[in-house]
Image (cartoon, rainbow, N blue to C red):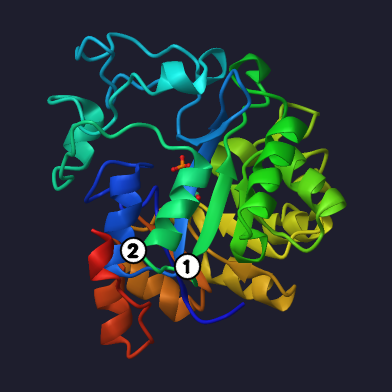
Amino acid sequence: MRGFDLQGHRGARGLAPENTLAGFARALAIGVTTLEMDIAVTADGVVVVSHDPVLNPDLTRGPDGAWLEAPGPAIRSLTLAELRRYDVGRLKPGSRTAALFPQQVPLDGERIPTLAEVIALTRAVGADGVRFNIETKLFPDRPDLTVAAEEMAERLVAVLIAEGVAERAMVQSFDWRSLLWVQRHHPTITTSFLTSARTLAPRGADPSPWLAGIDPRALGGSTPRSVQAAGGRVWSPDHRDLTAAQVDEARSLGLAVIPWTVNEPADMERLIAWGVDGLITDYPDRARAVLARRGLPLPQPLPSAR
Ligand code: G3P
Ligand code: CA
């Protein structure tokens, strides 16, 4: 990998509406090496940028301007034109998400963007070196919520190739099936293997359905060895579960380690001291301050992006 990879989570979720053009512009203005984002596919086959497969009432207002009362509808059930009618530029006051991100500055009127629009934004502001870490949001236990893993991966890669950014993109997923598809069909595209306690947990005698048939129990319970067994080169663990010994093990296997989602400067300091290759954060401004204190190079800010 190149230098330290500072990734803005859903743009800069702590500071601007998540997974929106405004949020990605904010991250670029602050200065990141990578924009982290999540995708869904609409009923008419368009790759859009959303964390949630169904519209989230904590951040979505309907065409009538009212907050959604419950999750839904599913993005896969809406055409892009229908999806455009929803506003995702403000957190619902009093919601759990609003309490988590008190510094988030709203921008009414923001829509769920297409992936192509996000890439176009980077071109428009001259962020020609910025990288993309794009998560296929899939749910092995809820296949009804999304298109199939292979279709999502295929549609994603088609956009990356059409937009000419495949070399700057990394495909990430908790659902390793989509990563194996990318490895098989587009082996030059980097894949990043996400893990959490929930997705690693076996189902009785069966392995977790998230791991594409890999069973960590057959590998001494080692998550880094499981990533390696799946052909992975990048491991992206939940930072709360990560240990220094695991970072050492991953590095000895030749894996890069990019933990998520690291928002406290003390955690950033500790993980950098352990030798992680990057981190994903809702607060790229905080991460830059930590990198600066340690004398590490900083990604170029693009103030005009904002
Ligand atoms: O990239 C890792 C991180 O984004 C995973 O968590 O739920 O925010 O997509 P989530
Ligand atoms: Ca994500």
**Residue 140 position (above or below residue 82):** below
> How far is disc 1 from disc 2 in space, using C-alphas?
8 Å
Please give the label number shown on residue 49: none
Q: Is residue 208 visible to us here?
A: no
Question: Which percent across, then down, holds residue 7?
Answer: 43, 62
Task: Out of 52 and 112, give the one closest to the viewer.
Answer: 112
Q: Badge 2 is on which residue?
A: 28
Residue 51 left/right relative to 168: left
Which kind of residue does numbered mark 2 sit on? Answer: Leu
The reply to whether the C-beta atoms of the residues labelled 1 and 2 are less than 8 Å apart is yes
Relative to residue 294, is residue 147 depicted above or below? above
Q: Quadrant of the N terminus?
A: bottom right
Name the image quarter holding residue 83. Answer: top left
Mark 1 / mark 2, whichever is N-terminal: 2
The x, y position of residue 28, in whole percent, is 33, 63
Residue 33 location, x and y as percent?
44, 70
User: Is 305 on the left-hand or right-hand side of 253?
Assistant: left
Which disc, if any, is residue 130? 1
Residue at the (43%, 76%) spot, across then down: 272
- Amino acid type shown at disc 1: Val
Is 92 above or below relative to 19? above
Local packing at callout 2 (Cα closer than 10 Å; few below 14, some 14-19, many 20+) is many
Please report the residue visible at 45 percent of the width from the left and 34 percent of the height from the top.
Answer: 50
